[in-house]
Amino acid sequence: MTMAEKPKHNRSALAAGRKELREIVETCEAISERKFNPFFLDVKLGVDTLRKYFPYWEGFNDHCLDAHTINRLSEVVRLQNTQLKFQSSALYVDPEFIARKIERMSEKRLAEIFLRSWHPLAQLEQLTKEAVANALDYWNLLLPIEERWKRREYPQGKRPGEAGSDTLTGLGIHGEEFSKQLTGLWNELRTLHDSEHRPIDYWKFVRGQSYSETVQRAYFASFLITYGYARLHSDGNQLTLTPIDQPLEKILPGAVSFPIPIPREQ
Amino acid sequence: MRAMESTETKSFYADRLKRAVHLLLFRRGKIPGAREWELKEKLGKNYEQVLAQLNQLLSELDLEIKKVSEPRSEETTSERAQLPKEEARYLVTLKGTLGVKEAKMIGWRIDNLSALSASIAYLVSKQGKASHEDLERLLAHKFGRWKAVTLVDIFLRSGYLEEDDAGILSLGWRTRSEVDLRELMTKMAEAKT
């Protein structure tokens, strides 16, 4: 009888059988990998499943799957046998019990227990003819230390440039220029706040004409917050700034560092 | 006549005893000690008698000759005991035990010893096998994650643990040679936390 001539229920049974066998194999594999207890699987039920679907197998692959399942089930039976033998031996202790003991015991106590059952090996290290030959080969192939250090040297790229106080002042991040910039930004924030009568959106405030300008404004804004001239509020994704007219001279208790990455699109 | 025979036997054994000591103590391969067939070949058929006599001498030095089965796929000791004799390896181990100070003197750290103790006890409780992740997780609770990773690596390299391709850890040749598992598990179960 060909596949096309088979009754519909036979084909569904075939598909169900293949699925069940694959599931049994997967469970057996998990048991072999110590993910489950070997007694997690009802081997008799597995064998009954094999028997149930055996008449429906059609091709070589189905029979291979059948044989593979039997093989995996036999492995589980072997593991069950091993576990029973182990449980009846003096070495059997519940793994959970041991894990709890390990967790609660001090390191010293654990070491002491180990030392009472430890009989280290006594052996003498020695030089053999082969060892000497290997050592000589290694030594002969070893480059002089200068050569080896040369290999470790990294290629020297352009060294970072140095910025003097004049350069920093010119950039507006040092000296009087810095204070001027900071005061200007603070006044800008106060004016904006007075006109809108609500906290100002952080990104709206720091955004400049270019990326570098945005970074510069964010940089100065961070000083306004640190020095107590503005307060930063974070409400989920929303960041707002509120100017403070009378800044405190000391750092507020509970103040935290709040890094704000500036993406290019800002 | 008898006295002469006795002298001959003594000298016969003295020569073989030296050979046995050399075979057992001087490390030649990756694993110390000597295989049973090597001893049979070098010491003759009555190698067991030679080893018994040597054992008597060594016991005065707090050492003993231990017969250990070579690693096999099965984990239970009862199954290993049924292996053919040719698979056995003879090693010299300390008969007694070391104290904490002595262990430190031979280069062991207390935290490493306690981690080894925990690893072996855990593996034994899991019938000699556990996944790499499980053991690392257990050790990480006590020693921290990074240390746990390092410790498992140390135990693998030193032969106390073994790992198969699937990442399943088992007791290594060194644990089987050096550790009295029954004693360890008994002490572990008895210990007050």
Image: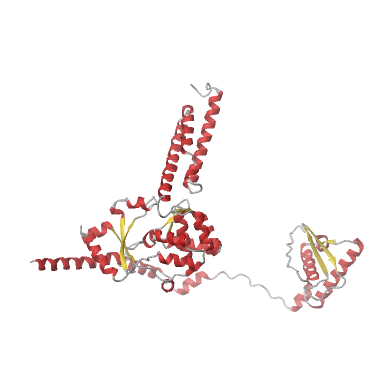
Q: In this rendering, does residue A248 appear at all?
A: yes
Q: Up-down: is B158 above or below B61?
A: above
Q: Position of residue A148 (x, y in %)?
A: 47, 71
Q: Quadrant of residue A236?
A: bottom right
Please, is residue A162 above or below residue A95 in the view? below
The answer to which of B24 and A113 lies nearer the viewer is A113
What residue is shown at x 42% (from left), y 61% (from top)?
Answer: B184
Q: Is residue B8 above or below residue B37?
A: below
Provide residue B172's location: percent of width, then percent of height: 41, 58
Q: Splitting the image into 4 quarters, where does residue B49 fall?
A: bottom left
The residue closer to the viewer here, A17 or A154, is A17
Identity of the residue drawn at 23% across and 58% down: B41
A266 to the left or right of B37? right
Rendered location of residue A183, percent (x, y): 85, 72
Q: How is the image coloured?
A: secondary structure
Query: For the view shown, which residue lies furthest in the right direction?
Result: A195
Outermost left residue: B1
Residue sitting nearer the eye, B134 or A235? B134
**Residue A18 drawn above or below residue B156:** above
Q: Is residue B82 left or right of residue A239?
A: left
Q: Return the x and y of residue B13 as percentages of the image width and height.
A: 19, 66
The number of discs equals 0
Locate the C terminus of chain A by quadrant: bottom right
Residue B91 left/right relative to A161 = left
Residue A127, visible in the rendered structure: no
Image point 11% across, 65% down: which residue? B5
